[in-house]
Image (cartoon, coloured by chain):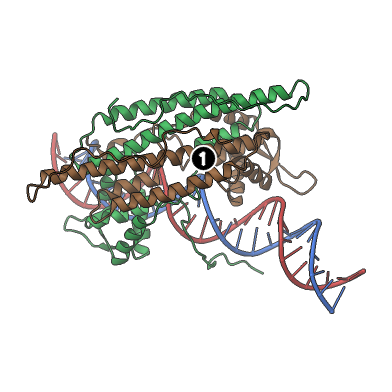
Chain colours: A brown, B green, C red, D blue
Amino acid sequence: MVCIPGMVASGGHENPGGPMSVRHSLLALLEEGPMYGYQLRAEFERRTGGTWPLNVGQVYSTLARLERDGLVEARGDDGEGHRMYAATPAGTAAVGEWFATPVARSQPARDELAIKLAVAVTVPGVDVGAMIQQQRSATMTALQEYTRLKARAAVDDPAELAWTLVLDSLVFAAESEIRWLDHCETRLRRAEIDRARRTPSSSVEPSSSVEPSSSVEPVETPGGAR
Amino acid sequence: MVCIPGMVASGGHENPGGPMSVRHSLLALLEEGPMYGYQLRAEFERRTGGTWPLNVGQVYSTLARLERDGLVEARGDDGEGHRMYAATPAGTAAVGEWFATPVARSQPARDELAIKLAVAVTVPGVDVGAMIQQQRSATMTALQEYTRLKARAAVDDPAELAWTLVLDSLVFAAESEIRWLDHCETRLRRAEIDRARRTPSSSVEPSSSVEPSSSVEPVETPGGAR
DNA sequence: CGGGTATGCATACCACGTATGCAGTGCCTC
DNA sequence: GAGGCACTGCATACGTGGTATGCATACCCG
């Protein structure tokens, strides 16, 4: 089970320099017609309901890179002094390819919480139990906020539909995270018992497998709240 | 009239420029004792089981920044010519603060798949149904890979324990993603039906909601053997 | 009514952190 | 001495947040 660090290096460069989801999203939005930078940000945030606020500066630098790569084309102005951008045929093709290619799960994105916990259990002097409890509390607060936001959703607008789907993804992720935290808790308890059993000094008789109850209700479809 | 770009007032900067999980992780690893750069990468990847390969170059640049901020201290060499780093008291305090502060879920990390799908449903000419099916297939393949890896896990080593927890987090996330994709599918189908009903002759007649079933088993702990 | 100020839109640029690749150095082995 | 490996450092590109600038509109006040 040893992983030699040097062996992972070689390989194709799938996405050099980050997720690039913003780049592709802006390009895809231009399929609806020419737009200018500020408008693109507004359209992006309208679809995600402001869940992931997009910095305006990134829009312009991304557009410059897209123009450099020949995926978009800049037109002087539309009469109002706005710098308009339109997708080139190559850009349209790139959008089609993006939608046709699934998000690679072979090299999953960095999960800050998972990394943090993996480090915590291997570094001495860390109260992992307290860490888990605190994180679960924070995640549950976020979950309540999502539920509150979902009550204000309308279903007739397609942009609102996109936002509710994004919101549902947040709910699913948060619920999954809480379940994982519960899982880690029982797992760590069991490991501690095993370690105590191996220690001959002052052997304590532990109770057989402890299985605490989960803190969330078993799966619940987030769409059912209406 | 000239704008001097340097010396801009820095307000309360929470996490400027990204998650910073690598920075904190390397600092925390130094709590176990002085290490050099290459060794730090190996320790990080051993704990995460090579799930998130860490570029060596990033280790050194991160160490340089940590030294600049007074969180680590560089010592000439350990007799072998290695450039050793050790955590300063300020660094140890920073580690404690990191473990005491839960990961902020108020501004969740960018989810590439959620963004992609939100854009897809609002851009004309995209076969969202095919997209979802393809993504589900890819995620299920990853899920099988995780299950395969978990069969090779040992439980006696604490580092292995950390890795299995990371692996479980991937399993939980993948299962959650599949459930979300199912949810999106039924949601979109319902929206399409609603749209078709409105199209022929603007007969405004709200109907009762339908509650479809999920295609994956209700929650199941990945820790159990399948 | 005219001028000053606030506000919002729109573009551009800068600073810092993350992330990857590659160049370079010293050591060991064949 | 050529090549491989451990090890370090740098150049580059991109994400992210912030700020300066120009312009138009709205608002307040003497």
Q: Is residue A139 visible?
A: yes
Q: Quadrant of the N terminus of chain B?
A: bottom right
Residue drawn at x 28%, y 31% is: B150
Residue drawn at x 38%, y 59% is: B65
Residue C15, image x and y in percent? Answer: 50, 61
Lateral position of residue A30 relative to residue A212, left or right: right
In the displayed structure, B143 sits above or below A75; it is above
Query: Tag 1: Cα neighbours inside 10 Å, few (<14), some, or many (≥20)?
Result: few
Lateral position of residue A206 relative to residue B18, left or right: left
Seen from the viewer's position, the closer of residues A97 and A153 is A153
Q: Quadrant of the C terminus of chain B?
A: top left
Residue at the top extreme of this rendering:
B200
Seen from the viewer's position, the closer of residues A170 and B139 is A170
Residue B54, image x and y in percent? Answer: 34, 44
Residue that mark 1 sits on: A20
Residue A90, image x and y in percent? Answer: 61, 30
Indicate the secondary structure of the residue bearing disc 1.
loop
Lateral position of residue B120 relative to residue B110, left or right: right
Lateral position of residue B114 relative to residue B58, left or right: right
Badge count: 1
Subunit under mark 1: A
Q: Which amino acid lies under the numbered mark 1 shown in the image of this protein?
A: Met
In the displayed structure, A7 sits above or below A185; it is above
Residue B64 lies in quadrant: bottom left
Seen from the viewer's position, the closer of residues A85 and B212 is B212
Residue B143 lies in quadrant: top left
Q: Is residue B55 visible?
A: no
Seen from the viewer's position, the closer of residues B225 and A2 is B225
Residue B74, image x and y in percent? Answer: 27, 62
Residue drawn at x 61%, y 50% is: A56
